[in-house]
Image (cartoon, rainbow, N blue to C red):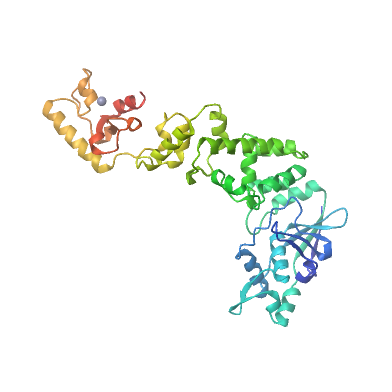
């Protein structure tokens, strides 16, 4: 792979004929059409948050370095940005008056700067490497130089490595924040479409967790129906099973839950009512576990992380139980006291006992002192396993 260092190219040169696609939020071309700012394997422009993009402009106006920019020369002679897309797009947006910064105590666009500053800005030299190599070499290298600013996440990396018609078609659906479906998906799927997190979920679901293998196998596909069908089936199933959306549903492993439960019939009204009850129950400390608990027929309270008795309750119950047991000459574990074994009259220390719900929480027992008893660890475990 060849690399040449260039220090003669200015911001003005790079941004000549800058084209920005407002709808997709990305910079497209520069250098009078000779530079492709966003090759398909690049991530979307994510600096337009009024902070990172402004910081790029501030750096230039204050004469700070912008860091290295890497370009790739393609066989047809066009250049594409390997690293620096975010910075170039910020510069281009500023030069075309699409970005406002605070300078000299007031809000300014490029045209409102004085002529001297405008000159200084557009004549600032960039430090850039222009590389030439095979696609394989360039992509391997792109993985290594993934340095400045926001690191690429796994999905952004996969999109680069397995770029092609499949990724392009998937991104048009799942990475497009203007897709009106994003709002509905956002109830169940966590993350920012622009950072490829919705796409990551869709691929995780269809591939059962083997995203990279799936992308490698389907790289040249133009048909993304298997992905969209799987994704839609899961979303439709969740929203039909739980008619009322809850914030706690966001980002749950719906793919796995779908596999496990989609053949089980549910009564959505009944499900809704049960979820609502559990949401109101103070003893349920893991509200996100409610959905799996209900899908599984309310049999596994571990999913809910039921609140334990507090230290004061435990101490009070231990002391009362122990005093009564000593007076009767039996064990302070009521189960041991009923047995005829060697522990019949054994007095356990507090550390040898656990607090137990007399009536199990799952059968409506509350986590209050009236429903608390101390059992030796062996009997508590035996009761829990019943
Ligand atoms: Zn016992």
**Residue 209 visible, this angle:** no
Tell me which corner region of the image, top left, top right, bottom left or bottom right, holds residue 281.
top left
Residue 181 spot, x, y in % from top left? 62, 47
50 or 163: nearer the eye?
Answer: 50
- 237, above or below 7, in the image: above
Image: 382 above or below 114: above
Residue 131: horizontal and vertical position, in percent?
Answer: 80, 56
Q: Residue at x 25, y 32 (%)?
A: 374
Query: Which residue lies at the image location 72% right of the left edge and 53% below the top edge?
Result: 42
Residue 213 on image: x %, y %: 69, 36
Locate ligand 1 by image quadrant: top left
Question: Where residue 144 appears, x then y in whole percent?
Answer: 70, 51
Q: Nearer the viewer, residue 348 or 106?
A: 106
- As displayed, is residue 283 above or below residue 65? above
Task: Report the front residue among 130 and 40.
Answer: 40
For this orientation, the residue located farthest to the front is 269
Residue 55: image quadrant is bottom right
Q: Which residue lies furthest to the top in this view?
A: 340
At 41% from the left and 34% from the top, the residue drawn is 302
Res. 191 in view: yes
Q: In which quarter of the image is the C terminus?
A: top left
- In this rendering, position of residue 63 left or right of residue 375: right
Q: Residue furthest right?
A: 76
**Which residue is rendered at x = 69% and y = 63% of the image?**
87
Across the whole image, how many numbered discs are drawn on residues?
Answer: 0
């Amino acid at each position: 792979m060849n690399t040449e260092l260039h220090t003669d190219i200015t911001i003005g040169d790079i941004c000549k004929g800058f084209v920005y696609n407002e709808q997709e939020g990305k910079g497209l071309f520069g250098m009078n059409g000779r530079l492709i700012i966003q090759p398909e394997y690049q991530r979307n422009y994510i600096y337009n948050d009024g902070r990172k993009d402004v910081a790029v402009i501030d750096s230039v106006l204050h004469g700070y370095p912008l860091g290295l920019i890497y370009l790739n020369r393609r066989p047809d002679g066009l250049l594409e940005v390997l690293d620096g897309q975010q910075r170039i797009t910020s510069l281009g947006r500023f030069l075309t008056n699409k970005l406002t910064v605070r300078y000299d105590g007031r809000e300014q666009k490029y045209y409102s700067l004085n002529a001297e500053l405008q000159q200084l800005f557009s004549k600032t030299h960039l430090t850039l490497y222009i590389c030439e190599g095979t696609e394989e070499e360039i992509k391997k290298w792109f993985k290594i130089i993934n340095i400045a600013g926001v690191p690429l996440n796994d999905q952004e990396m996969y999109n680069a490595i397995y770029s092609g018609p499949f990724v392009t078609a998937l991104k048009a659906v799942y990475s497009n924040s203007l897709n009106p479906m994003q709002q509905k998906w956002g109830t169940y799927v966590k993350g920012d479409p622009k950072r490829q997190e919705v796409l990551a979920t869709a691929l995780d679901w269809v591939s059962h967790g083997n995203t990279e293998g799936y992308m490698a196998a389907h790289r040249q596909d133009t048909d993304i129906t298997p992905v969209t069908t799987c994704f839609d089936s899961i979303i439709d199933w969740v929203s039909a099973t739980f008619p009322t959306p809850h914030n706690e549903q966001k980002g749950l492993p719906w793919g796995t839950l779908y596999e496990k439960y989609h053949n089980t019939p549910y009564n959505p009204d009944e499900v809704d009512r049960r979820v609502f009850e559990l949401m109101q129950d103070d003893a349920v400390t893991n509200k996100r576990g409610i959905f799996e608990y209900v899908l599984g027929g309310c049999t596994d309270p571990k999913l809910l992380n039921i609140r334990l008795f507090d230290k004061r309750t435990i101490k009070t119950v231990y002391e009362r139980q122990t005093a009564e047991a000593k007076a009767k000459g039996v064990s302070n574990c009521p189960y041991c006291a009923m047995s005829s074994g060697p522990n019949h009259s054994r007095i356990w220390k507090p550390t040898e006992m656990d607090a137990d719900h007399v009536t199990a929480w799952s059968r409506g027992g509350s986590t209050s002192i009236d429903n608390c008893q101390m059992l030796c660890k062996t009997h508590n475990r035996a009761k829990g396993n019943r």
